Every structure is written in structure tokens, then in C-alpha cells.
Amino acid sequence: MTVEIRPSQALKLWHDVTLDLVRGGDADLSARQMTILMTVYLEAPPHTVRGLAEKLGVTKPAITRALDTMGRLKLVARRRDDKDRRNVIVQRTVEGALYLERVGDLIVAKAGALPR
């Protein structure tokens, strides 16, 4: 399905969604944290710290710092890979799935309210 909107509408949508996220009671994630979260939930597992760092083009410590915050919020979980103890596997959680479902619902609602 193709949705056609003007750049100004796209920016308005992004603004309205992020404004609601900042004002809301849910976690206020950075762009990096949100990208990590969506990658973990929208792309097929497994996800590792190393793989996420490579995909996002940032360092492993940057991913680890983001995951520390997201772990405290219970949006993701981490565990050592049993096959290769050097790898850290990033796992989905129920709380993370529910958070992203709310974000998706918010995007749909805000997109429907865009002036045509």
C-alpha cells in the first residue's frame, strides 16, 4: 500500500507523533533507542549487540548504553549466546511489544488527522 503525503505532511506527522511520545507517560526514547527497538521488533531475530552496531553504524558501547536504558524500561532483554559467549543476544519483551503497538496506533491516529 502506497501512501502519498507531501514532505510538509510527513514532517507534521513526525512532529505530532514525537510530541505525543514526549508528553505521554510512556518512555521517551532517543532516535537511536527507537531505531534499535524497531529493528529488534520488525526484523527477524536473532539480534546481537555487534549486529545492531554494524547495522546502525555506531559503536558497540553506544548500543550497550541504549540497551541499558531500554532494559531498565523492560522494552528489551539481553542474554549471552550459549553457542558463542562473546555474543550478546537482544530479545523482545511483552512490554516492548506493547510499547511499539501503542506507537503504531499513535502514528495511524495522527496520520488520519493530517490535513489533506
Image (tube, helix red, strand yellow):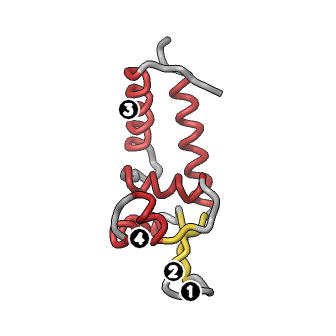
According to the image, label 2 marks what residue? 87
SS class, disc 4:
helix
Q: Judge whether 47 appears above or below 112 on screen.
A: below
Circles 3 and 4 in contact, beta carbons < 8 Å: no
Circles 1 and 3 in contact, beta carbons < 8 Å: no
Residue 6 percent location from the top left of the image: 43, 19
Closest to the observer, 33 or 6: 6
Q: Residue at x 56, y 86 (%)?
A: 84
- Separation (CA) of disc 4 from disc 2: 16 Å
Amino acid type of the residue tagged 2 in the rendering: Asn
Amino acid type of the residue tagged 3 in the rendering: His
Q: Residue at x 61, y 64 (%)?
A: 93
Residue 115 percent location from the top left of the image: 47, 14
Among the two numbered marks 1 and 4 on one chain, the one whose residue lies closer to the N terminus = 4
Q: Residues within 10 Å of mark 4 (few under 14, many from 20)?
A: some
Closest to the observer, 116 or 71: 116
SS class, disc 2:
loop
Mark number, residue 54: none
Circles 1 and 2 in contact, beta carbons < 8 Å: yes
According to the image, label 4 marks what residue? 68
Mark in the foreground, 3 or 2: 2
Among the two numbered marks 4 and 2 on one chain, the one whose residue lies closer to the N terminus = 4
Circles 4 and 2 in contact, beta carbons < 8 Å: no
Amino acid type of the residue tagged 4 in the rendering: Asp
Among the two numbered marks 1 and 3 on one chain, the one whose residue lies closer to the N terminus = 3
From the image, which quarter does the N terminus lie in? Answer: top right
Residue 50 percent location from the top left of the image: 45, 72
